[in-house]
Image (cartoon, rainbow, N blue to C red):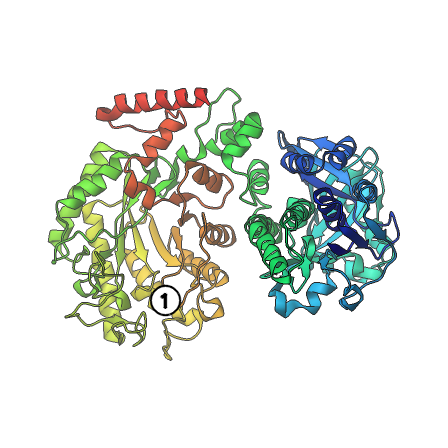
């Protein structure tokens, strides 16, 4: 096969090597615009696993790379001169120029023809005599740009500014250096890549960039200011650029996240940064490019590719086989990018938590990953988190540390959230199921248990099998459940009060019946607007002033009953399309009076209910609100930025805790699922509105709970389905951690002791 490779960077050269190794008969030409030995950028970072992959693919070039690699295990985080160092991370780096020398020499030795100083653009007619054209022309690919529609290109330009520099200062660790200026925070990503130089990437928000005047500086002035800002880290060494051709502020750029739905068309295929990009803060761009090259060479090593259809299938397989791995890295890179873009949320953390948050920002590194890498450092973080910094103190894992709100003291950070059980009788009273269900979970060790939605009125139920708290008979049954939990466990009990609004009067979702199927003989519904929750659903009546007065009093009466029942906390449900959510969300609220239109107006009634409940609920007991922080409808619904405004208003109204959920306000929603998929909303609300939060949403491992609370992303973590499957999930996690801090009901102590021993035995056997 005759192959033209457009771009002589690591991707293009390594593909040429990989293809030649598989079939020396390939006639491969690499076309590069720059002179031989000319490159931009400084060092690139690999992992040990990447080097293993390269060694398996081509041991000759990999061994030459290995002899030029800089190795380091430490990450250092410095904030205004205060430093913390964590070890065991296993990074390796190499100078980009040295890498290109190795790959260029190896390609030539294998018979690849390299054409330097060869200008090319999106016009591919010059390469019509080639069987395959590989576009390895980087992040600014002209081939991709000219064929964007065919390739399904999406480019997301990020907000922060960065400048890629070098220095002769040798850093012993991968260093993150944060300095505060009059214009805001600015930071550097610095790492050594050979015996004489380090990469030094300077990054800041656009506001800081403008405030420092970089926009109006020529490159020497810009570098001089960076040297001044980072003087304490450079020890007199200069900052250096190898992009002197760039004028003025052009040396500062915004990262562009490139995503392509298709990676090929006709006989043209994209490779590396031309097809996808990953933010420099996780150092995976070159790794992805090299691994792309290996896979592309593999799929081309098939018989019969002279047939255009066979070639098309091979290129499609290349994309399909690489897409998932690339997407994982891109998602991690996006998380990392957003962490730096929202630095103000975290920079006020104490240094141990700030460093932990930085190290876990991409969600690729978890709590237990850090324990494997540097158990001493993580132990120090856990001691800090527990509030006891004494070296001899053996701290509990963060999930098992207490948490206090008002007079409510929780034994740990684990929450059993509200989960509908559809087990009440038609009068909204509990049945024999409820004491067993809630009693089992109270005995199971969770710090807080939130009841399923308790309707504040008969017409406020979702189904006829949903319980309420609108009469005294219901009060007495819940009082028995709460009393049992208090007498036999350390669990605190929270009543979730709700009015189903447009989602009421539905059949029980069992058998072949789905969710939100109206009753054959429904009761009338009420909502903010005369708008069904979903197409074909029951149309509610728009609430009038008398309705609003009555429903508000329903919430107040239910709160008074919750106090008599002995509940430790109340949670008002204002999410998931319920009545209060129908006021909050523009997707459900079409009112034109003082309760509709602007967010301020849509908040008016939910705030009225909250304030009324707060007046009758004891001030020493916490009041929580659950709402949907993202309608997943773009600007047509509540956005995360709106959620911060809502949380601040609720806080000012006397709310102590936000239970952060998302979605279920419209069937048109397009949620982005994944592990911990709603935690970013909890993080944003907690750290921008200054109110404690519960994170919920596809969280199922103790490791995830530890990571979330230690990083300051949430204060409590709710796990619903894990506790449905295993009522003693929390005690089981305690046993697995060899934890002795949690209360175990006396009848179960022997079993918990055995569980700890078995867990330790299993660890020793690994």
Residue at the spot of label 1: 667
- Give residue 64's position: percent from left, percent from top: 78, 34
On screen, residue 129 versus residue 708, left or right, reads right
Vertical side of 651 occupied by 444: above or below: above
Quarter occupied by residue 79: top right
| 97 to the left or right of 258 | right
Q: Is residue 189 above or below residue 526?
A: above
**Pointer 1 local density, CA inside 10 Å: few below 14, some 14–19, many at least 20:** few
Determine whether the residue tagged by mark 1 lies in a helix, strand or loop. loop
Q: Residue furthest bottom?
A: 592
Nearer to me, 405 or 58: 58
Residue nearest the observer in this picture, 571 or 405: 571
Image quadrant for the N terminus? Answer: bottom right
Residue drawn at 12 percent across, 58 percent down: 426
Name the residue located 32 percent from the left edge and 45 percent from the top edge: 721
Q: How many marks?
A: 1
Residue 428, horizontal then vertical, whole percent = 15, 56
> Looking at the picture, how far across and down is residue 628, in whole percent?
39, 59
Q: Quadrant of residue 749?
A: top left
Q: Nearer the viewer, residue 283 or 420?
A: 283
- Can residue 536 be spotted in the picture? yes
User: Could you say which quadrant of the image residue 747 lies in?
Assistant: top left
Does 651 appear above or below 436?
Answer: below
Q: Is residue 172 left or right of residue 558?
A: right
**Residue 257 position within the rendered picture, expressed as x and y whole percent measured from the top left:** 64, 57
Compared across the picture, whether 125 is left or right of 481 comes to: right
Is 600 drawn above or below residue 325 in the view shown? Answer: below
Q: Is residue 211 visible?
A: no
């Amino acid at each position: 096969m005759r192959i033209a490779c457009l771009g002589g960077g690591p991707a293009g050269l390594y593909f040429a090597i990989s293809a030649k190794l598989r079939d020396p008969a390939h006639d491969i030409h690499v076309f590069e615009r720059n002179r031989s030995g000319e490159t931009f950028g400084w060092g690139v970072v690999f992992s040990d696993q990447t080097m293993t992959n390269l060694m398996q693919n081509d041991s000759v070039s990999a061994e030459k790379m290995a002899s030029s690699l800089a190795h380091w295990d430490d990450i250092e985080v410095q904030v205004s001169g205060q430093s913390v160092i964590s070890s065991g991370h296993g990074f390796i780096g190499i100078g980009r120029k040295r890498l290109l020398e190795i790959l260029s020499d190896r390609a030539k030795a294998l018979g690849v023809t390299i054409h330097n100083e060869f200008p090319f653009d999106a016009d591919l007619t010059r390469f019509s005599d080639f069987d395959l054209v590989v576009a390895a022309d980087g992040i600014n690919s002209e081939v991709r740009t000219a064929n964007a529609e065919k390739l399904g290109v999406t480019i997301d330009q990020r907000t922060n500014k960065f400048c890629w520099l070098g220095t002769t200062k040798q850093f012993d660790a991968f260093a993150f250096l944060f300095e505060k200026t009059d214009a805001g925070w600015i930071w550097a990503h610095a790492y050594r890549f050979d015996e004489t130089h380090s990469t030094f990437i300077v990054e800041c928000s656009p506001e800081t960039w403008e405030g420092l005047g970089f926009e109006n500086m020529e490159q020497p002035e810009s570098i001089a200011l960076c040297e001044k800002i980072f003087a304490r880290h450079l020890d007199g060494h200069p900052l250096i650029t190898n992009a002197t051709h760039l004028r003025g502020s052009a040396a500062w750029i915004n990262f562009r996240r490139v995503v392509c739905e298709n990676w090929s068309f006709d006989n043209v295929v994209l490779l590396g940064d031309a097809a996808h990009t990953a933010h420099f803060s996780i150092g995976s761009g070159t790794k992805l490019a090299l691994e792309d090259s290996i896979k592309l060479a593999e799929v081309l090593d098939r018989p019969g590719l002279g047939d255009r259809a066979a070639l098309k299938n091979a290129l499609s397989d290349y994309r399909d086989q690489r897409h998932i791995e690339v997407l994982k890295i891109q998602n991690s890179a996006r998380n990392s990018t957003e962490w730096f873009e929202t630095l103000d949320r975290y920079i006020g953390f104490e240094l141990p938590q700030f460093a932990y948050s930085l190290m876990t920002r991409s969600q690729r590194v978890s709590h237990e990953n850090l324990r494997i890498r540097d158990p001493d450092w993580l132990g120090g973080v856990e001691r800090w988190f527990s509030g006891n910094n004494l070296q001899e103190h053996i701290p509990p894992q963060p999930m098992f540390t207490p948490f206090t709100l008002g007079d409510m003291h929780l034994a740990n950070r684990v929450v059993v959230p509200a989960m509908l059980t559809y087990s009440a009788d038609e009068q909204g009273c509990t049945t024999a199921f409820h004491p067993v269900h809630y009693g089992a979970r109270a005995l199971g060790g969770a710090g807080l248990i939130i009841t399923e939605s308790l309707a504040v009125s008969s017409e406020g139920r979702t189904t006829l099998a949903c319980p309420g708290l609108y009469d005294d008979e219901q009060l007495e049954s819940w009082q028995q459940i709460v009393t049992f939990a208090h007498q036999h466990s350390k669990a605190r009990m929270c009543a979730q009060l709700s009015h189903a609004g447009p989602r009421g009067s539905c059949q029980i979702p069992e058998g072949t019946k789905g969710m939100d199927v109206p009753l054959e003989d429904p009761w009338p519904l009420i909502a903010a607007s005369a708008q069904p929750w979903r197409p074909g659903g029951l149309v509610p009546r728009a609430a009038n002033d008398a309705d609003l007065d009555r429903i508000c009093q329903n919430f107040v009466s239910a709160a008074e009953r919750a106090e008599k029942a002995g509940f430790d906390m109340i949670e008002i449900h204002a999410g998931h399309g319920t009545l209060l959510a129908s006021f909050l969300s523009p997707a459900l609220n079409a009112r034109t009076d003082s309760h509709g239109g602007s967010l301020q107006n849509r908040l008016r009634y939910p705030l009225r209910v909250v304030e009324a409940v707060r007046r009758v609920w004891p001030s020493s007991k916490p009041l929580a609100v659950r709402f949907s922080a993202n309608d997943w409808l773009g600007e047509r619904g509540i956005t995360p930025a709106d959620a911060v405004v809502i949380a601040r208003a609720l806080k000012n109204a006397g709310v102590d805790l936000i239970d952060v959920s998302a979605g279920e306000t419209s069937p048109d929603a397009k949620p982005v699922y994944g592990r911990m998929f709603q935690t970013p909303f909890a993080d944003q609300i907690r750290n921008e509105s200054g109110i404690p939060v519960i994170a919920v949403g596809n969280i199922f491992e103790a490791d995830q709970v530890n990571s979330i609370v230690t990083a300051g992303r949430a204060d409590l973590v709710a796990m619903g389905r894990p506790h449905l499957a295993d009522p003693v999930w929390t005690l089981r996690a305690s046993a697995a951690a060899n934890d002795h801090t949690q209360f175990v009901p006396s009848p179960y102590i022997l079993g918990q002791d055995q569980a700890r021993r078995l867990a330790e035995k299993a660890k020793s056997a690994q």
